[in-house]
Image (cartoon, helix red, strand yellow):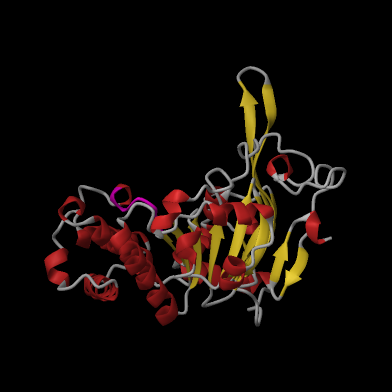
């Protein structure tokens, strides 16, 4: 029995049926906490990497999760990939598969539905394998035994990422191709099993500026031609306009603003989003003469985050007795636009 058959059988036995009009992926009040232990003294607290995060991703939609280093983006991504188990809440795929309840067979099937594009292409590619072997590996693991089918998929994947003539690239090793070509191989590998969801972890941050937009446009083309749901993880707001329809801004393990991309770039509401936009690189030469106002201090510890709004120690608009005491809910601040900030109470 294949993994696919096992999942179908388990679904039938449990009485689960396809949920019409359900999101491709639903993040429901997700918490991912990592336990800290002192040597010889037991439990010492938790790192609250993801703390009560919720959002939906529709089939064929691209969303961006944006925030500075240490805000919880990677922990969220690894949970979506099935590498972390939720502490509370859940990740629901196609309205019926819950990561917290998946057995080994279902989890293996789920991971075939999710493609992953890593940040560092050279580090992501085995140096002792050529391009053909790199792209064959996930198919061998998935149980595709027909060599002809594997080769056909490889040719199709490399053609889609514009690495032609294909036969010239198949025998090459990662060190023999450029960084942009390495990332194209990573993307081809992510697409080789025809996933329904693609998670791209800062896919252009390690590339030259000259090829970043090219790679993002390639991903956008694949998303549209395959009707993929895509989650784009990044800290760079300057690239999201090329790729995403919606944007979720993360700070200290929580989402503080959700908005359509163009709306947020033109009319951000949360003070932290304003700070991110102020710090975004600008190609204008006059930018070198302009002092950028950024909030003082550092992001808080995720072991002991501050009470109330987690941004309040750095916020220039703090409301004493409110921001430093109560956790703000999501306030509607525009069409499909929310901000977790007491300024909009």
- Report if residue 121 lies within the magenta region: yes
Horizontal side of residue 167 vs 248, given as left or right: left
For the residue pair 211 and 76, the one nearer the viewer reads as 211
Where is residue 280 drawn, in percent x and y?
49, 55
Kindly identify the residue that appears in the image at 28 percent across and 50 percent down. 122
Splitting the image into 4 quarters, where does residue 43 fall? top right
Spot occupied by residue 161 in the image (x, y as percentages of width and height): 29, 71
In-front residue for pair 292/49: 292
**In the displayed structure, would residue 312 be above or below residue 89?**
above
Q: Give the tally of numbered discs.
A: 0
Front position in the image: 216 or 229 = 216
Quarter of the image where the C terminus is located: bottom right
Residue at 18% from the left image edge and 50% from the top image edge? 175
Q: Quadrant of the N terminus?
A: bottom left
Residue at the extreme top: 40
Q: Residue furthest right?
A: 321
Q: Which range of residues does the magenta coloring cover?
A: 117-122
Residue 304: x %, y % from top left: 71, 34
Horizontal and vertical percent for residue 287? 44, 54
Residue at (37% x, 69% y) in the render: 191
Residue beneath the point at 72% across and 72% down: 334
Snapshot quadrant of residue 171: bottom left
Q: Is residue 85 visible?
A: yes
Residue 313 in magenta?
no
Q: Is residue 316 above or below residue 45?
A: below
Name the side, left or right, on which 290 lies relative to 176. right
Whether residue 27 is visible, yes or no, is no
Which of 14 and 300 lies nearest the eye of the viewer? 300
């Amino acid at each position: 029995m294949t993994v696919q058959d096992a999942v179908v059988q388990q679904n039938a036995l449990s009485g689960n049926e396809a949920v019409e009009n359900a999101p491709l992926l639903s993040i429901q009040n997700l918490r991912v906490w990592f336990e800290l232990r002192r040597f010889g003294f037991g439990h010492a607290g938790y790192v609250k990497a993801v703390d009560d995060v919720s959002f939906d991703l529709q089939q064929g939609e691209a969303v961006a999760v944006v925030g500075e280093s240490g805000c919880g983006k990677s922990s969220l991504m690894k949970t979506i990939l099935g590498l972390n188990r939720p502490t509370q809440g859940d990740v629901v795929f196609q309205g019926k598969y819950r990561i917290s309840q998946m057995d080994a067979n279902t989890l293996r099937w789920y991971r075939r539905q999710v493609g992953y594009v890593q940040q560092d292409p050279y580090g992501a590619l085995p140096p002792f394998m050529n391009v053909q072997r790199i792209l064959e590996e996930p198919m061998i693991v998935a149980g595709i035994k027909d060599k002809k089918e594997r080769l056909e998929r490889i040719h199709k994947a490399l053609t889609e990422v514009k690495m032609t003539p294909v036969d010239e690239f198949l025998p090459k090793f990662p060190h023999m191709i450029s960084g942009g070509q390495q990332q194209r191989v990573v993307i081809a590998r992510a697409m080789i099993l025809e996933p329904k969801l693609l998670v791209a972890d800062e896919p252009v941050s390690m590339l030259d500026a000259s090829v970043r937009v090219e790679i993002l446009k390639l991903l956008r083309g694949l998303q549209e031609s395959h009707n993929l749901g895509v989650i784009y993880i990044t800290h760079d707001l300057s690239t999201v306009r090329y790729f995403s329809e919606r944007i979720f801004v993360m700070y200290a393990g929580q989402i503080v603003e959700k908005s359509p991309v163009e709306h947020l770039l033109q009319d951000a509401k949360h003070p932290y989003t304003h700070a991110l936009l102020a710090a975004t690189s600008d190609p204008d030469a006059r930018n070198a003469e302009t002092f950028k106002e950024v909030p003082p201090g550092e992001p808080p510890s995720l072991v002991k985050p501050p009470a109330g709004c987690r941004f309040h120690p750095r916020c220039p608009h703090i409301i004493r007795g409110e921001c430093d005491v109560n956790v703000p809910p999501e306030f509607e601040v525009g069409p499909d636009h929310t901000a977790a900030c007491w300024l909009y109470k």
